[in-house]
Amino acid sequence: MRRATLEMMVALGLMCLCIAGTIEAWGFPKESAYLPTAVFAAASLLSLLWAGQAFAARLRGGGFLIIEPLELRRLGLMAAGALVLAVAVPTLGFFTSFAFLVPGIAWATGYRRPQGLAVGTLIFTGLLYIVFVLFLNRPLPAEVWQSLFA
């Protein structure tokens, strides 16, 4: 299979999911609908652009897909991380789970710079806090450490 063909199929599938997300987010309460609707709509457009680029590459006769074992391992680790996250969030809490999982997945996939892991985790978790707590004012699963001290 040509790489461009696979990319085009994935981009179109992602675009369909993002359009469905846009429609779903449109029905949220007015204060909560703005950000997810904008993100899903932007992702829909970016997916369409990606599909267009892949289509153009397909017309030019792009190369065939070669899947490296290391890439498959990394994909598997990320999928396993997503499953662990689904179990960890109700147990450990939203931010605690992400604080452990972001550097854990990065480390498992080969990123070994502790300072970069720490900074990236702080930025990612901080952005989650800003979006969900400050901007959207959404209740999130309680943190495990809060229940220990309460």
Image (cartoon, helix red, strand yellow):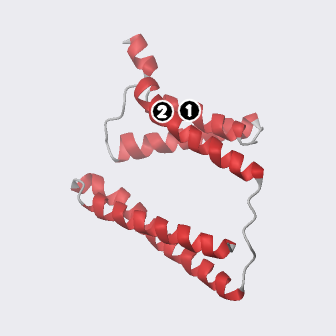
Left or right: where 130 falls relative to 110: left
Height in image: 92 above or below 139? above
**Element under label 2?**
helix
Image point (67%, 82%), residue name = 57
Which residue extends farthest bottom? Answer: 59
Q: Between 34 and 105, which is closer to the camera in this rendering? A: 105
* Residue 18, picture quadrant: bottom left
Left or right: where 81 falls relative to 71: left
Crowd around label 1: few <14 · some 14–19 · many ≥20 (10 Å)? some
Q: Which residue is mark 2?
A: 95
* Residue 33, picture quadrant: bottom left
Which residue type does callout 2 highlight?
A: Phe
Image point (71%, 42%), residue name = 109
Height in image: 99 above or below 16? above
* Residue 62, picture quadrant: bottom right
Q: Which residue is mark 1?
A: 99
Residue 68: percent from the left, percent from the top? 77, 56
Q: Are marks 2 and 1 in contact (CB under 8 Å)?
A: yes
Left or right: where 57 falls relative to 82: right
Residue 132: percent from the left, percent from the top? 38, 43
